[in-house]
């Protein structure tokens, strides 16, 4: 997964316009970018994870990650995600999956990772017109916000905590940080 590229901020903005009106795609894009979760964890989100018992949208989301068994930090939702949740989720049963399978009227199952992957490939190819969609996957959404946070803060530790990863080394590798990147930062700082 380390080789998968994050989406650029420009690509995210373009996609938001292109998927507008498609409930599933709007939810996947906005929550996928905001929450920085692995695909499986994202797809297992329940309505109760994003709404309070009174039915209002939570400002932050906290879940237990399946792979690491760690609970994420409380990740704040952006205005985009809050608006999409208000538009599509408010009023749904609290036990429903946010990303319901196409066959959810028969059974309460989440969207499959395979379906999610196909949607991301479609976004990159058909919507954004990229020739090489193999560089993108569901993991690209997880990497998008974390990469922007790293670019703005240069803090691997902050990104590590947000992603719930166990070591700075793993996060550095995940972000694709090379020794040359560290040297470039060192060159720009004069004491």
Image: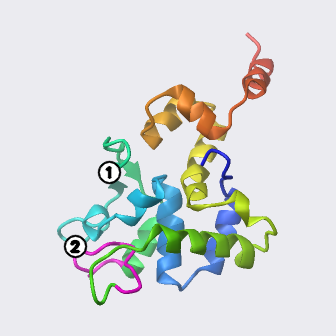
Where residue 187 sits: x, y (%)?
Answer: 80, 19
Vertical placement of residue 63 versus 44, above or below: above
Label 2 Cα crowd, 10 Å radius (few <14 / some 14-19 / many 20+): some
The single residue placed furthest to the top in the displayed view is 191
Q: Quadrant of residue 55?
A: bottom left
Q: Which residue is mark 1?
A: 62
Q: Mark 2 or mark 1: which comes first in sequence?
A: 1
| Residue at 53% from the left image edge and 58% from the top image edge | 33
Q: Secondary structure at mark 2?
A: loop
The single residue placed furthest to the front in the displayed view is 114
Q: How many marks?
A: 2
Where residue 86 sits: x, y (%)?
Answer: 37, 76
Residue stretch rendered in magenta on the structure: 89-103
Label 1 Cα crowd, 10 Å radius (few <14 / some 14-19 / many 20+): some
The reply to whether the magenta stretch includes residue 50 is: no
Where residue 149 sits: x, y (%)?
Answer: 59, 42
Vertical placement of residue 106 versus 122, above or below: below
In the picture, measured across the screen, residue 138 lies left or right of residue 51, that is right
| Residue at 66% from the left image edge and 52% from the top image edge | 4
Vertical placement of residue 177 versus 183, above or below: below
Q: Which residue is mark 2?
A: 94
Vertical placement of residue 40 versus 64, above or below: below
The reply to whether the magenta stretch includes residue 92 is: yes
| Residue at 39% from the left image edge and 73% from the top image edge | 85
| Residue at 34% from the left image edge and 55% from the top image edge | 61
Q: Quadrant of residue 140?
A: bottom right
Dots 2, 1 in contact, CB < 8 A: no
């Amino acid at each position: 997964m380390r080789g998968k590229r994050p989406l650029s901020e420009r690509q995210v903005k373009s996609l938001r316009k292109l998927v507008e009106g498609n409930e599933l795609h709007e939810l996947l894009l906005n929550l996928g970018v905001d929450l920085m979760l692995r695909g499986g964890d994202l797809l297992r989100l329940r309505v109760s994870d994003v709404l309070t018992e009174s039915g209002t949208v939570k400002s932050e989301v906290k879940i237990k990650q399946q792979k690491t068994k760690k609970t994420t930090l409380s990740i704040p939702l952006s205005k985009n995600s809050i608006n999409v949740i208000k538009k599509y989720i408010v009023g749904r049963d609290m036990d429903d999956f946010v990303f319901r399978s196409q066959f959810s009227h028969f059974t309460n199952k989440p969207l499959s990772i395979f379906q999610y992957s196909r949607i991301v490939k479609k976004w990159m190819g058909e919507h954004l017109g990229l020739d090489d969609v193999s560089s993108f996957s569901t993991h690209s959404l997880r990497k998008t916000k974390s990469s922007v946070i790293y670019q703005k803060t240069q803090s691997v530790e902050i990104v590590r905590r947000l992603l719930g990863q166990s070591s700075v080394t793993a996060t550095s590798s995940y972000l694709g940080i090379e020794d040359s990147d560290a040297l470039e930062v060192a060159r720009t700082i004069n004491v």
